[in-house]
Amino acid sequence: MSRGLEATTLATAVGCGLVGGVFFAFSTFVMRGLDRLPPAQGIAAMQSINRTAVSPLFMAALFGTGAACVGLMVWVVRAPGDQPVAWVLAGGALYIVGALGVTVARNVPLNDTLAALDPDSAGAPGVWSRYVRDWTGWNHMRTIASLGSAALLLVAQARGR
């Protein structure tokens, strides 16, 4: 594995781990903490979190890591020599499908539904209860996929030496 490919693999693994850490925090304590609040307060807090999460820095980490995965996958397939192709392809695909795909297909639509909800409406507590259950379940998948991707890419880097 060339130095450039080795460095890119490591940087991409770090990106996967960073994003996985954010997801891990939500899965292990943020959502539990929000769910302990009265529903209207939990809804309002999550609505605020969702608005502030769409920031240049977090979007760069989330989607930039996905772009790095794609670039790395192309690079390793096209690189001459004995490369850990399968490990890189598995790690990149896991992040793209399990982190980005789940985000776009599951978590964002749930966030959009929550954004339209009046926290003080009569049906809000029921919507909030379902939201916490469903969003957190999908977030667990994103966490596992992101951290699994980081692990696979680190194995690829180790095997490429």
Image (tube, helix red, strand yellow):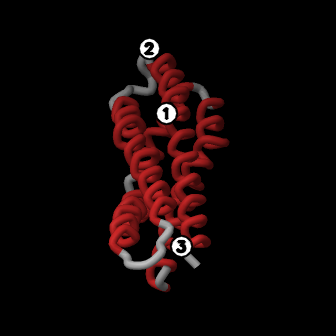
Q: Residue at x 48, y 27 (%)?
A: 131
Q: Is residue 160 shown to the viewer in this render?
A: yes
Q: Residue 48 appears at what percent x and percent y?
A: 45, 44
- In what element is the residue under mark 2? loop
Q: Residue 33 appears at what percent x and percent y?
A: 65, 37
Along the viewing direction, whichever of 40 and 3 lies nearer the viewer: 3
Q: Nearer the viewer, mark 3 or mark 2?
A: 3
Q: Residue at x 55, y 74 (%)?
A: 160
Please, what is the three-letter code of the amino acid marked with disc 2?
A: Ala
Q: Earlier in the sequence, mark 3 or mark 2?
A: 3
Locate the C terminus by quadrant: bottom right
Q: Earlier in the sequence, mark 1 or mark 2?
A: 2
- In what element is the residue under mark 1? helix
Q: Residue at x 39, y 59 (%)?
A: 66
List the single residue furthest toward the bottom: 3
Residue identifier under label 1: 135
Q: Nearer the viewer, mark 3 or mark 1?
A: 3
Along the viewing direction, whichever of 134 and 125 lies nearer the viewer: 134
Please, what is the three-letter code of the amino acid marked with disc 1?
A: Trp
Indicate which disc residue 10 carries.
3
- Report the Cα–Cα distance between label 3 and label 1: 30 Å
Q: Nearer the viewer, mark 1 or mark 2?
A: 1
43 shown above or below 70:
above
Q: Residue 113 appears at what percent x and percent y?
A: 35, 30
- The reply, left or right, for residue 104 in relation to residue 94 is left
113 shown above or below 54:
above
